[in-house]
Amino acid sequence: MEQEQEATTPHECLTEVIEATRSYENGRVKALRGVSLRIEDGEFVAIIGSSGSGKTTLLQLLGGLDTPTSGEVKFRDKALSEMGDLSTYRAEKVGFVFQSFHLLPTLTACENVQLPMVESPLSMRKREERAIFLLKEVGLADRTHHRPTELSGGERQRVAIARSLANKPDLLLADEPTGNLDCKSTAMVMELLTRLHRENGMTLVLVTHDLSTAAHAERCIEMSDGVVVKETTNPAAR
């Protein structure tokens, strides 16, 4: 008697890199050498590697901050090269978290979180309401009116994460988000990112050189000298 196979629903591909290269200085510096990568909707992927391995360049291609010298990057099966001005793609589809926070020092936490929404159709009141909601989501309800200089490093990074979620992105890209943080703040930020991923089904791609940080991801991609050299899965993170 044949055993019935359990039906499985295939995941939709959110973003895909196809044989991408990226060269600088008239081809003398080769940051990427034919990288192909597929990221499914709702995945948490870590990209690891030493400095100069190409991991940040790859993240910049995924986010439309840079374009490949050759090859292609697709988002929901549409090539980024066919989208023209990528500022709309970056504003509406992608959230960015950087190592250095990039908060404006003269603005409060609430005002910093509202910045990506300035061009949105939301009213000023709705923008403020969403910013307050997001700050509460990242555990900073009591820091709404504090400026960056009044916040710890971990708190500033949580404000930056709240800001990255302002426009409800499909894809969250985090470039060494714990690189400037102490151990306690690192644990808090990674717990937050993992929770946001699990609770909201958010697609998260994180670049790091820290293996303990990468261990939070469901899939880990290791890069060296501009190519993918190893790929592993972590069932415990699912």
Image (cartoon, grey):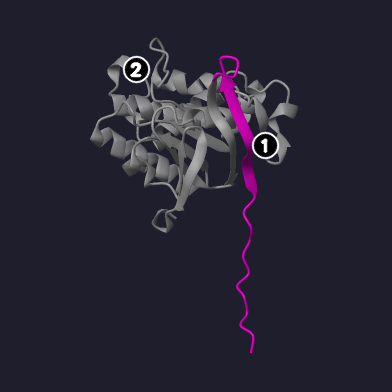
SS for tag 2?
A: helix
Quarter-wise, where is residue 37 in the image? top right
**Front position in the image: 91 or 219:** 219
Query: Tag on residue 183?
Result: none
Give the number of the mark in front: 1 or 2: 1
Please report whichever mark, 1 or 2, sits nearer to the chain's N-terminal start: 1
Q: Residues within 10 Å of mark 1 (few under 14, many from 20)?
A: some
Circle count = 2
- Please name the residue that numbered disc 1 is placed on: 74
Q: Is residue 204 visible?
A: no
- In 3D space, how far apart are the residues under numbered discs 1 and 2 (Cα atoms)? 36 Å
Identify residue type, mark 2: Pro
Looking at the image, is 234 positioned above or below residue 139? below
Q: Is residue 60 left or right of residue 9?
A: left
Query: Tag on residue 148?
Result: 2
Residue 58: image x %, image y %?
A: 54, 31
Quarter-wise, where is residue 139 in the image? top left
Name the residue located 43 percent from the left edge and 27 percent from the top edge: 52
The span shown in magenta is 1-28
Q: Is residue 182 visible?
A: yes
Q: Is residue 147 left or right of residue 207?
A: left
Looking at the image, is 212 positioned above or below residue 102? below
Q: Residues within 10 Å of mark 2 (few under 14, many from 20)?
A: many
Tell me, yes or no, whether the highlighted magenta stretch contains residue 151. no
SS for tag 1?
A: strand
**Front position in the image: 166 or 88:** 88
Residue 170: image x %, image y %?
A: 59, 38
Given the current orientation, which residue lies at the most extreme top position?
106
Tell me, yes or no, whether the highlighted magenta stretch contains residue 13. yes
Name the residue located 39 percent from the left edge and 28 percent from the top edge: 51
**Front position in the image: 197 or 49:** 49
